Amino acid sequence: MKQKTYSDILPEKGYDIEGIENGKCTVLFFDNIQEENQENIDPENEEISEKKTYSYDLYALEVSYRENLAEEIEDNFGSWLDKAKEIDYNEVAVEVRKKRDELLACTDWTQMQDTALSQQKQQAYRVYRQALRDIPEQVGFPYEVEWPENV
């Protein structure tokens, strides 16, 4: 899953291969690397020092390990990164939709004709449920979701 990561070490390249075991490994991709300066104040002498830190989006991709894997990634880095992002996006989108569908299912009863809810309350639930259905259309979906407030 995409993860915003902070480190005082700048990644040497856009990826790292780790966890080689049983013919499998994890390829970590570093994207959107940004340098940030962090000011530190020494409490004893009140001197200000700057420390470089880096932030980046981290994507993990599980793949079959092979001897020439690093060369494959370097030769087609953009494609590998795009694939990692696509898989991550789809996995997160599935989780968000699952939660959305659960919230919809919990409010199905509000739209039944024999409900004891007032027309006003039923309409409020209709609006809430439509907002839930519109979540995939939000800018930033699936990483930045603004969940509607339940009635």
Image: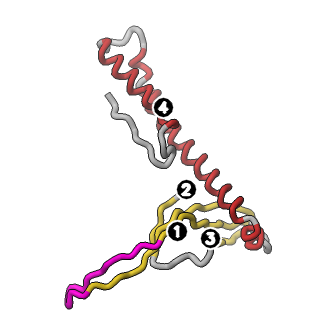
Question: What x and y, as percent, mark residue 112?
Answer: 42, 13
Question: What x and y, as percent, mark residue 52?
Answer: 42, 79
Of tags 3 and 2, which is closer to the observer? 3
Of tags 2 and 4, which is closer to the observer? 4
For label 4, the crowd category at 10 Å Cα-Cα, with few meaning under 14, some 14 to 19 and many 20 or more, is few
Using the rendered view, name the quadrant where residue 64 is placed: bottom right
- Element under disc 4: loop
For label 1, the crowd category at 10 Å Cα-Cα, with few meaning under 14, some 14 to 19 and many 20 or more, is some
Mark sitting on residue 147: none
Labels 3 and 2: the sequence-earlier one: 2
- In front of the other: 106 or 118: 118
Tag 4–tag 1 contact (CB < 8 Å): no
Question: What x and y, as percent, mark residue 81?
Answer: 65, 60
Does the image show residue 10? yes
Residue 17 on the magenta span = no
The span shown in magenta is 35-47
Q: Which residue is mark 4?
A: 134
Mark sitting on residue 1: 2
Give the residue type at disc 1.
Ile
For label 3, the crowd category at 10 Å Cα-Cα, with few meaning under 14, some 14 to 19 and many 20 or more, is some
Does the image show residue 23? no
- In front of the other: 112 or 42: 42
Labels 4 and 1: the sequence-earlier one: 1
